Amino acid sequence: MNTATQRITLTAIGTALFVALTLCLQVPVFENYYLCLGYVVMSVWCFSFGTFSGTVAGTLGVILYCLLTSGLRGMPGWALGNIVIGLFLGTAFRAGRRIKNRFLQISLYIAAVAAGTTLGILGVKSLTECLLYAQPFLVRAGKNIYAFVADLVVLIVSLPVCLMLDPAAGKLFPGLTGNRQPSHGQKEGQLC
């Protein structure tokens, strides 16, 4: 299988896992809000397979989940918000690989999760719903605070999962991950 086909297949697997975790593992936290455990998949995919793969898996995962459960209700804003979150995560994860100090690396990841979730859920999702439902922005942002807190918690908790699963992803899919595996004649840690 060539690299493009493998990347498409991995993205489809990520999308399916996002939907499965979101549907099957619903942990209630607020009134009608559940922890969206599909975000663990999105962050692992952004971390190990890149910004594009993780963002597509998270966005298509939300679209499929909403179509299966509630139709279009809530989907446009959530899907657009996931694009923003995925772009923030993927960019920060790629930049973080160059940082040798573990404290600074984790700080960057947490800051990216917080900024991406704030802009994606409180900003883009609220603005989209404001336009769709003709409600004031502050009303929509207020209603999205529960989703923001729940998503933020899941994404922060997923960071250790990303760090733990990344070496295995690098071994299974060496040409498709952010890990750089030494080629023949190279020593471990030598990139070129």
Image (cartoon, rainbow, N blue to C red):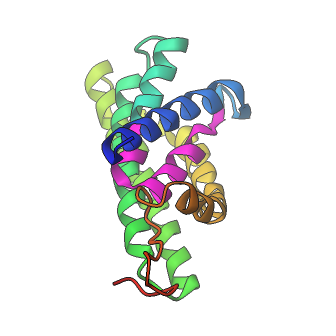
Residue 42 is one of the magenta-drawn residues: yes
Q: Residue at x 59, y 47 (%)?
A: 40
Q: Residue at x 50, y 54 (%)?
A: 173
Q: Is residue 82 above or below residue 101?
A: above
Question: Quadrant of the rendered structure where residue 27 is?
Answer: top right
The image position of residue 56, as x and y in percent, is 37, 39
Q: Residue at the front extreme? A: 185
Q: Nearer the viewer, residue 95 or 82?
A: 95
**Residue 122 in view, yes or no:** no
From the image, which quarter does the N terminus lie in? top left
The image position of residue 95, as x and y in percent, is 37, 73
Q: Nearer the viewer, residue 22 or 32?
A: 22
Q: Nearer the viewer, residue 33 or 105?
A: 105
The image position of residue 61, as x and y in percent, is 47, 30
Q: Nearer the viewer, residue 91 or 121?
A: 91
Magenta stretch, overall SS: helix
Q: Is residue 113 above or below residue 138?
A: below
Q: Which residues are magenta?
A: 34-57
Q: Is residue 85 above or below residue 162?
A: above
Residue 45 is one of the magenta-drawn residues: yes
